[in-house]
Image (tube, rainbow, N blue to C red):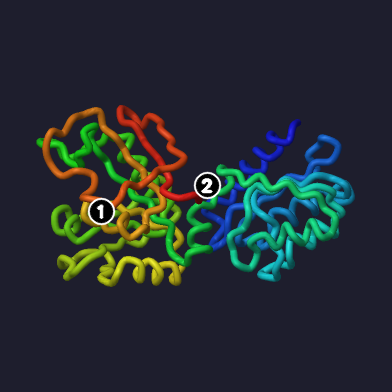
Amino acid sequence: MPDDAHYAQALELAERGRGRAGDHPLVGAVVVSNGEVVGEGWYEYDVIRHAETIALEQAGDRARGATLYVTLEPCSHHGRTPPCADAVIAAGVGRVVVGALDPNPLVDGRGIERLRAAGVEVELLDDFAARRQNDAWRVWKSLGRPFVTYKAAVTLDGRVTVPGRRWVSGEESRRRVHELRAASDAVAVGMGTVRADAPRLDARGVDAVRQPRRLAFGRGPLPEGSQLELRSGPLDEELRALGEEGVQSLLLEGGPTLATAFLEAGLVDKLVLFVAPVLGGSGPGLLGELGAPVELRHLRVEPAGDDLLIEAYLREP
């Protein structure tokens, strides 16, 4: 099996920890000796042991001279466990293929440096798939705020409403929105949306391990009986406070005013648009006036029922 297949296996293993990694990243590891997989592991918070350690223990003596494929740079500091880089060196691994650097200031290249200093051959892929797998955690760890995804449903002519219709997008797109909510630590709208629609912002009809925190940005008061949290401070300060409270990911569902404010402040990391096959003809557009164009990266398009789902990043994850 070639390098890319073993590395792809490590990415797949990392996904097994989704929803179980706590405030840690997803990590998958595969140990290969003479073309045979002799150890594999992934990170789960309750297991405590890191992916590399689990894979190396499975490999045992066969780890000596083997190749380790790991989706994230092995750590080089003492946390809940000893440094993974030290475990790799002690096991006698000959080569390590790393998917992405760890942006944690306590690591950030030091794990790779330690491996190379010990004579281990290291190949850094800087792979988008590995960075995307932990996009929210990477922003939270490096910038101290949640990773912000702006989600909207729009018509082909860029309207966010369709006269005479309750919904812009179709049933499949709306189901996916609930999946996005279930995968997010928090969901937010602006006070204009709160007053107009009284949104619930919870995840319904999907397998949600827990409900996200539900926020409203802007000036209050909230309507009587609202279950939302009001955040009235400057956006950057509110996001920093949410980051300190452990919120890694924020799904922004507000209207054009809130979305434009976030974009102008440079606080949107990812764009998710559900584009419906209809021309609205009138009504509010996706955004207000921006001070400058915003470049999009890693554009991806796929069907969502009768709609199109467009996903793009505003900066490298």
For image coordinates 23% across by 44% down, the residue present is: 286
Question: Mark 2 near mark 1, Cβ–Cβ under 8 Å?
Answer: no
Query: Tag count in the figure?
Result: 2
Task: Please give the name of the residue rendered at 80% of the width and 54% of the height, measured from the top-left corner.
Answer: 57
Position above or below: 238 against 250: below
Mark 2 to mark 1: distance in Å? 24 Å
**Which residue sits furthest front?**
292
Q: Is residue 112 left or right of residue 163?
A: right
Residue at image point 75% right, 56% down: 53
Q: Which residue matches tag 1?
A: 254
Q: Residue 126 at what x, y percent from top left? A: 62, 47
Q: Amino acid at mark 1?
A: Gly
Quadrant, the N terminus: top right
Element assignment for label 2: helix
Q: Secondary structure at mark 1?
A: loop
Q: Nearer the viewer, residue 114 or 212?
A: 114
Q: Is residue 302 above or below residue 144?
A: above
Along the line of sight, the residue nearer the viewer: 207 or 254: 254
Q: Is residue 31 left or right of residue 191?
A: right
- Give the residue at mark 2: 132
Q: Amino acid at mark 2?
A: Arg
